[in-house]
Amino acid sequence: MIERILEYRARALVILSGSPPNAIVEESLRRGLRVILVNKPMRGVAADTILSDDLLGAQLAADRLVRSGARRLAVVASASRTPNQRRRIAGFRSRAREHGLPITVWAAGETSYETGRRAADALLPHCPDGIFCVTDLLAMGFLDGARHRHGRSIPHDFSVIGFDDVAAAGWSAYGLTTISQSVAALTRAVLEAVEREGLPGRRVVLPVELIERDTVRKQDEVTPLKRG
């Protein structure tokens, strides 16, 4: 693979996969090829790293679910546990802890639509009322499983938030509230890393934002908690 890349006299190798073999990165650097890692932090390598602000995004999701009235929180992830998935789980867990709320972490299978449906089967008997899915694909599977296999109404029965803001998240079939990463900002950061002179090794964290759609209860629909 590296030999083929070098044949094209590439200026840089941009690695987008969450978990490519480290040997590819190390061999590319050894051959003098500039390497740009997207959402794949690696310690001890002279590569540029571009990350979405997964920690902040997960914290925004936790805060929004709590504002929706959710008190029984759950996270849906896959068994791949890529660096960005681990950051999103950690960010959600830490913010839930700040709110004084426990969370259930469900992680199994591939990062796929079907895994999201399986997560709905596993979690809904335990009655969570706020679910954070670490990717939109998992969230869409979860929503369809909850609606079509369990007869649940979202957001009436519980709220769901995804992450990535893929095109399908905005379809009327889903109307998924999610955390958005700017594709334009990512593109600019990659191009700047390719063009930048001097030593590599710069770390760039890209901003994220909460996109409100239809899978989280509106704040004016929340019944205040009784005190005392």
Image (cartoon, helix red, strand yellow):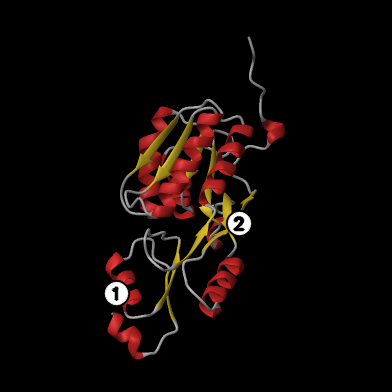
At horizontal 32% and vertical 45% (from top left) the residue drawn is 108
Amino acid on which the number 2 mark rests in the picture: Pro
At horizontal 55% and vertical 52% (from top left) the residue drawn is 174
**Residue 166 vs residue 44, the one in the foreground:** 44
Instruction: Mark 1 and mark 2 in contact? Answer it, CB < 8 Å.
Output: no
Residue 164 position within the rendered picture, expressed as x and y whole percent measured from the top left: 52, 56
The quarter holding residue 3 reads bottom left
**Residue 196 vs residue 74, the one in the foreground:** 196
Give how far apart the Cα atoms at labels 1 and 2 are. 31 Å
**Secondary structure type for disc 1:** helix
Residue 80 position within the rendered picture, expressed as x and y whole percent measured from the top left: 33, 52
Q: Which mark is residue 27?
A: 1
**Secondary structure type for disc 2:** loop
Amino acid on which the number 1 mark rests in the picture: Glu
Q: Which of marks 1 and 2 is nearer the N terminus?
A: 1
Residue 129 in view, yes or no: no
The quarter holding residue 126 reads top left
The residue beneath circle 2 is 207
Left or right placement of residue 201 versus residue 115 in this view: right
Q: In which quarter of the image is the C terminus?
A: top right
What residue occupies the far right of the structure in this picture?
A: 220
Residue 198 position within the rendered picture, expressed as x and y whole percent measured from the top left: 51, 76
At horizontal 32% and vertical 48% (from top left) the residue drawn is 79
**Residue 9 vs residue 202, the one in the foreground:** 202
Relative vertical location of residue 200 with respect to residue 83 in this rendering, above or below: below
At horizontal 50% and vertical 40% (from top left) the residue drawn is 92
Q: Residue 143 carries which label?
A: none
What residue occupies the far front of the structure in this picture?
A: 198
Relative vertical location of residue 56 with respect to residue 65 in this rendering, above or below: below
Relative vertical location of residue 96 with respect to residue 9 in this rendering, above or below: above
Residue 97 position within the rendered picture, expressed as x and y whole percent measured from the top left: 50, 30
